[in-house]
Image (tube, rainbow, N blue to C red):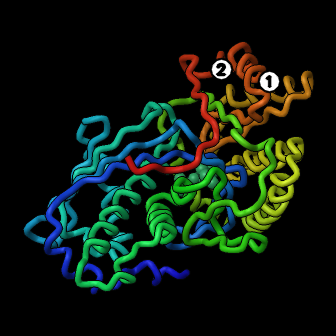
Amino acid sequence: MTEKDFIPNAKHYTDRLHIIEDGHFTWSSPSNIALVKYWGKKEHQIPENPSISFTLNHCKTITTLSFSKKENDDQFSFDVFLDDDKKDDFKPKIETFFKRIEIYMPFLKAFHFKIETSNTFPHSSGIASSASGMSALALCLMSIEKSIITSNTTLNSVERSFDNNYFIQKASFLARLGSGSACRSLEGDLVVWGEHEKIKGSSNLFGTKYPFEVHKNFKNYQDTILLVDKGEKQVSSTVGHNLMFGHPFAKERFKQAHNNLSSIIDILKTGDLKAFIKIVESEALTLHAMMMTSMPYFILMKPNTLEIINKIWAYREKTNSNVCFTLDAGANVHVLYPEDEANQVLDFIKEELVVYCQNDHYISDKIGLGAKLL
Ligand code: PMV
């Protein structure tokens, strides 16, 4: 697939676009947590290295996109609401997104849109909502595209059919243009994004379901997110990715991500939890090391992030547990553990880790299967 394959055939739109007046779609789409991290991109949100993530189950964005035909089709027109509050400060990001995807969604200027969105996790939790938010919006837009094309009676039945695979692939492709990691939030419990020599079908343009065998040790894997710092991100991910341009260790880092993804394929197959921990924790620390060694440099961990990491290492040493941590580009800690250790690890979290969270706040999640049309 190339970018051109996502540019629709004008004939598929022309007739119906005049007939469809209004409607609405609602999608719920989850957040994801990367095991091998995406950090560094080329133009057009093309990743410098492949990444793989667990799709979350409870941390989701629910978006309703209402659309109504407008008089002029010379500019984008939309309003955004978060939990019923009008959010004009969200508009520039969505305007940029619309501009990037217009060539793939030729109907965007024909409608006025009302975007109503809410998150199942608190907005001020420091959990990035861009992956779940952009994927939910991309899915709603795909539902409009599908309704236009499948209802176009002037097309023959083959032209009118709308393959589910194409629907998800294009939704992921669009979500990527909104926020890179959003393309890993659509479908599947483990999702790969970025070309990797061992993963046939892997693409820089969209996320794909992890295609290989996964050992039962990784089924229903648990993720408790410890909210160490609920503030605004100190470094936006756009700035962060840009720090990889001319970074002295960038080339090695991108190579390492390829190697770590190769290793994780075997680990996921054999169920080797100790090897899994090594890769996942090393990836998290490498992501932060890249930020500490860039110019300008940043430390995104807080003292409590380190307290938690040390507590996890001490607990593992003492109990031989398979609990481990990973980090996003911020201070919060994702505590990952197998389902059969859930009770013990949750007790440990409550007794020893919650004190390091802001207002004792944490969110218990686990692996889920992806987005849903509501
Ligand atoms: O999707 P972005 O541009 O916000 O980048 C997110 C990057 C990390 O969350 C730090 C890593 C990843 O692979 O999700």
Judge whether 344 appears above or below 257 on screen. above
Residue 297 seen in the current view: no
Where residue 108 appears, as percent x and y from the top left, is 26, 68
Q: Residue at x 21, y 82 (%)?
A: 14
Q: Residue at x 78, y 20 (%)?
A: 344
Q: Residue at x 30, y 48 (%)?
A: 64
- Rendered-image quadrant of the N terminus: bottom right
Judge the density around disc 2: few (<14), some (14-19), many (≥20) Cα neighbours within 10 Å: some
Residue 116 seen in the current view: yes
**Pick the front one: 371 or 330:** 371
Quadrant for residue 228, please give it.
Answer: top right
Quadrant for residue 274, please give it.
Answer: top right
Which one is earlier in the sequence, the residue at label 2 or at label 1? 1
**Pick the front one: 40 or 272:** 272
Cα–Cα span, label 2 and label 1 = 11 Å
**Amino acid type at mark 2:** Tyr
Q: Which residue is mark 1?
A: 311
**Pick the front one: 308 or 232:** 308
Where residue 330 appears, as percent x and y from the top left, is 60, 40
Query: Does residue 236 appear left or right of residue 38 in this picture?
Result: left
